[in-house]
Image: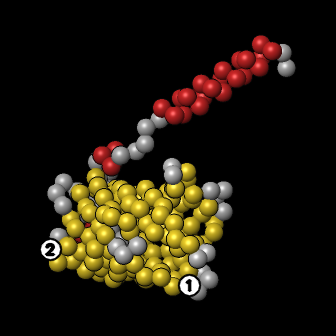
Amino acid sequence: MKPRHWISALLIAAASVALSGCASAPVPSDYAAQTPVFDLKTYFNGNITAYGVFTDRSGKVARRFTVDMNCTWAGNDGVLDENFTYSDGTKERRVWRIKRGENGKYTGTADDVVGVALGQASGNALQWGYTLRLPVDGSVYEVQFDDWMYLMSERVLLNKAVMSKFGIRLGEVTLSFYKN
């Protein structure tokens, strides 16, 4: 390749990277006009079953699991009792304590969550941000979750969460919830 062509190719590649970096990340208000409107308190009330996978950075499914949930509310305070069963037979439990605030805001805590999870609902979507203590091979790592939920119908909710550490994407969790 001629030197002039190398320079052109390099400039095009640099411009592509620069432009892709300008794309803004979605925010909950992007979904304000989408229906059906997602209300966490209404959907997560009663018994719910979810099916999920964890995919690593390459997109390979590393773990499959099922979650059986029992969800209850007293006013604006909710308890989401999650019982995980992984494809290898391992079981795990997480109990979320959720508080519904004003204007679609939610906060949540769980024993393996560092601090408080912050959520914002708008239209058919809800975004959660939190840090989770994740046990892996005898060690515990604190990883960040950018967790998005999308209400598809009265009974079906889809969830996609990106897991990262130090800003490096480690993988994704994809779930489909079915309200019984």
Distance between the alpha carbons at the discs numbered 2 and 1:
34 Å
Residue 115 shown left or right of residue 9 in the figure: left
Counting from the top left corner in percent of width and height, residue 48 is at 37, 78
Q: What residue type is labelled 1?
A: Thr
Figure check: 27 above or below 81: above
Front label number (2 vs 1): 1
User: Going 58% across and 77% down the picture, which residue do you hit?
Assistant: 138
Q: In which quarter of the image is the N terminus?
A: top right
User: Is 154 in front, or is 177?
Assistant: 177
User: Is 25 in front, or is 138?
Assistant: 138
Residue 36 visible within the image: no
* Tag 1 residue: 90
Counting from the top left corner in percent of width and height, residue 44 is at 30, 73
* Tag 2 residue: 75
Tell me if mark 2 has few (under 14), some (14-19) or many (20+) residues whose alpha carbon lies within 10 angstroms of its own: few
Residue 163 shown left or right of residue 59 in the figure: left
User: Going 56% across and 67% down the picture, which residue do you hit?
Assistant: 54
Q: Quadrant of the C terminus?
A: bottom left
User: Going 62% across and 56% down the picture, which residue do you hit?
Assistant: 57
Query: Disc 2 vs disc 1: Cβ atoms closer than 8 Å?
Result: no
User: Going 24% across and 74% down the picture, which residue do you hit?
Assistant: 78
Residue 14 visible within the image: yes
**The residue tagged with tag 1: helix, strand or loop?**
loop
The residue sitting at the front extreme is 139
Q: Quadrant of residue 3?
A: top right
Counting from the top left corner in percent of width and height, residue 24 is at 43, 37
